[in-house]
Structures are given as structure tokens and as C-alpha cells.
């Protein structure tokens, strides 16, 4: 018989974990609720697909994943370094574009701005995953998929991504 892994926190409207083994390093234990990582999971309730109208209704639930202080620190530092490197790379993209296409505005400037935005938004998650893996832990994106309760909810039809119409 499996023990209850979560309790519902009525005040915060979320599931708080009752077990404490860190799901990111599988070595240490969570000592405080504030160290845990909370993520949303979604369950599709109703979907309407008509030729001119699409709609999806879903339930959203916040669930906690146990995380030790060390993993929380690594995730925090990885995020800072990831965003910093993303910003530097994005500025580099703009400077290179301006160097190769001097004084040309219009489409080239538009692509330079799009390149900045894309680089700034797409590179940080990659570096966060790399930095976390180098420290020997799972990233914020990979940890929730390993949690036993979330795996059980995923088998019951819940998802980690919100449903789209």
C-alpha cells in the first residue's frame, strides 16, 4: 500500500509533498517547503473544435517537487548564468549583423532584432540544462518528469504543458 505523497495546501491551492527525497539529485532531502520546486500540471476537461471556433477548457494544479538546498542553489545560479550568457550572445548576434550589414536598415535591421530576441529567449534554457547536468543534477525542466507522483498523474491524463485549442 502506497502512502500519501502529497497533501493539499488549502491556503495556497497547491499540492505540497510529504516525502522529502530530492528528485533532482536523489541524494539529499528537502528541509523546508520554500526549497521545493513548484510546477503546474494540466488536465483537459473539454475541447470544442468547430470549423470557425476552437476552444479548450482545462484544470490547472500546482504541485511541489522535493528539492534540497544545494539543488535550489544550483538551479538559481544556473538560471542567472544562462540568462547572462543568453544576453551576451544576443548582443553578439546584433553586433555581428550590424558589422556585416553596415548602415542598412529595413529588413536587415528587422532580422537583427528578431535574431536578438530569438537568441535571448532560446539560449538560456539550453545553458541551464547544461550547467545543471555538469553539477550532476537534473534541470528544472527534467526533474518534474521524474517525480513518482507526477508520473502517476501523467498516466492518468495530466500533462506538464497547457492544452492548446
Image: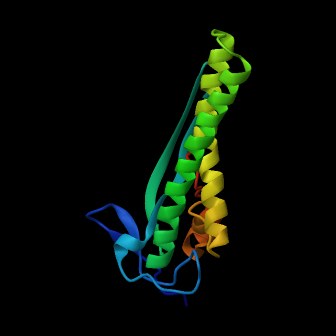
**Foreground pick, 148 / 165:** 148
**Foreground pick, 57 / 151:** 151
Picture coordinates of residue 19, whole percent (x, y): 46, 83
- The residue at the point 48 percent across, 60 percent down is 39
Give the tally of numbered discs.
0
In the rendered view, tell whether residue 26 sits above or below residue 41.
below
In the rendered view, tell whether residue 54 sits above or below residue 156.
above
Q: Is residue 118 visible?
A: yes
In the rendered view, tell whether residue 124 sits above or below residue 73.
above
Q: Quadrant of the N terminus?
A: bottom right
Picture coordinates of residue 21, whole percent (x, y): 51, 84
Residue pushed farthest right?
Answer: 100
- The residue at the point 66 percent across, 22 percent down is 98
Picture coordinates of residue 72, whole percent (x, y): 46, 70
**Foreground pick, 86 / 23:** 86
User: From the viewer's perspective, is 100 left or right of 77?
Assistant: right
- The residue at the point 62 percent across, 64 percent down is 131
User: From the viewer's perspective, is 10 left or right of 58?
Assistant: left
- The residue at the point 43 percent across, 60 percent down is 62
Picture coordinates of residue 165, whole percent (x, y): 59, 34
Amino acid at each position: 500500500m502506497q502512502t500519501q505523497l502529497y497533501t493539499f495546501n488549502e491556503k495556497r491551492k497547491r499540492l505540497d509533498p510529504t516525502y522529502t527525497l530530492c528528485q533532482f539529485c536523489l541524494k539529499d532531502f528537502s528541509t523546508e517547503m520554500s526549497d521545493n520546486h513548484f510546477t503546474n500540471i494540466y488536465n483537459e476537461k473539454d475541447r470544442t473544435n468547430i470549423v470557425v471556433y476552437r476552444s479548450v477548457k482545462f484544470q490547472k494544479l500546482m504541485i511541489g517537487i522535493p528539492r534540497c538546498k544545494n539543488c535550489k542553489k544550483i538551479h538559481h545560479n544556473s538560471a542567472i548564468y544562462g540568462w547572462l550568457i543568453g544576453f551576451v550572445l544576443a548582443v553578439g548576434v546584433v553586433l555581428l549583423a550590424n558589422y556585416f550589414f553596415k548602415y542598412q536598415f529595413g529588413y536587415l535591421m528587422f532580422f537583427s532584432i528578431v535574431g536578438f530576441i530569438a537568441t535571448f529567449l532560446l539560449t538560456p534554457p539550453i545553458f541551464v540544462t547544461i550547467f545543471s547536468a555538469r553539477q550532476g543534477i537534473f534541470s528544472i525542466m527534467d526533474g518534474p518528469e521524474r517525480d513518482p507522483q507526477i508520473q502517476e498523474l501523467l498516466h492518468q491524463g495530466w500533462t506538464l504543458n497547457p492544452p492548446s485549442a
